[in-house]
Image (cartoon, grey):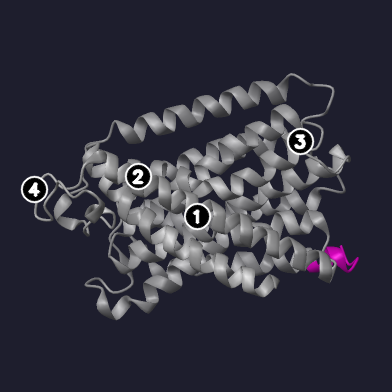
Amino acid sequence: MDLVILAVSFVIILVGAELFTNGIEWFGHKMNLAEGAVGSVLAAVGTALPETMIPIVAILFSSSGNQEASDAVGVGAILGAPFMLATLAMFVTGLAVLSQARRRPAGDVMPVDSDVLGKDIRYFFVAYGLAVAVAFVPSEFGWVKPAAAVLLLVIYALYVKAHFEADPNVDAVDLAPLRFNRLDRSREDDDPQGPRLRVVSLQVVAALALIIAGAVAFVGAVEHLAEVVGINPAILALVVAPIATELPEKFNSIIWVRQGKDTLAMGNITGAMVFQSCIPTVVALLFAGSSWAVTEDSLISFASAGIAFLSTAAIFLPMIRRGRLNGRGLLIGGLFYAIYLGLVVLSLTGVL
């Protein structure tokens, strides 16, 4: 039964992702937003909702009766999201680029806006670096974590502001017809103004509902299978669950790669990295501060942050220097993902 649920929820997420990418582009066009705001903020936040709900529910609405264990699961999920985005999501997107290379004018070269992605990466390093650094602060300095939480909210607000102030560059000529356009019977298909905002918004909301519903069902099935197999809950939160909950970002990026919209494809991932390093982390700092600490028990979990930093630097620092990004360069994310899985296996077997 779990396998059937996995298959059905997988299809639901796919349909939701296709509707979402189509709808969010139209929304950005109707609101005169820049491509960076559409991909790195709107799309990133929307598709980050499934994985964000896991730590929020675990930390704030635990029903297990063991708050310490719930907090540990929440912290594992928070650390797992940037790790998956910086490694596995990059790898999958790189594969998508290479699979389409013969049909793309530039081959595996991705004509991205390096300024947009560079901005995302700088904010990610600052925000996630601050969040992880606080985990090393001794517990007697109790004021540090709330202060860091406030600072992270300020950082994300500045990040959103920077993207929304950029010049609009989403051209309606590049957009596929809105999937829900036929619901607006008072508008013609060739109307130069395109679909009305309320119809666009309806499609975006419907797509998000499908994505969230599919992700919740997918994660539930994965968790049940993990329980049957006997996987540690912390490892489940850090490694297994994010694979499922990051599916929307991966699917969105693959869809945009196939359409040749590489800035949107990559911005969807890098923007989610910034969001995950700020907003869910604030929840941990304010409500699970004792668990947001580097200890002997949590060392492997926090090692994922180091892997995320290394993978991000290896992929994007060459882009920032050269002003270009290659699909094959994204494949290095898979290497870092494999390295971390190796550390997890060594830890579980008692070698580390």
Highlighted magenta segment, given as a residue range: 345-352
Pointer 3: residues within 10 angstroms few (<14), some, or many (20+)?
Answer: few
- Give the quarter of the figure containing the C terminus: bottom right
Residue at which label 2 appears: 202
* Residue closest to the far top: 143
CB within 8 Å, label 3 to label 1: no
* C-alpha separation, residue under disc 4 versus residue under disc 3: 56 Å
x 55%, y 54%: residue: 213
* C-alpha separation, residue under disc 1 versus residue under disc 2: 14 Å
Residue at which label 4 appears: 192
The first of marks 1 and 2 along the sequence is 2
Residue at which label 1 appears: 211
Q: Nearer the viewer, residue 20 or 37?
A: 20
User: In the rendered structure, which amino acid carries the disc numbered 1?
Assistant: Ile
The first of marks 1 and 4 along the sequence is 4
Of badges 4 and 3, the one in the foreground is 4
Residue 136 disc label: 3
- Give the quarter of the figure containing the N terminus: bottom right
User: In the rendered structure, which amino acid carries the disc numbered 4?
Assistant: Pro
CB within 8 Å, label 1 to label 4: no
Q: Position of residue 142 (x, y in %)?
A: 78, 21
The answer to whether 290 is drawn above or below residue 182 in the figure is above
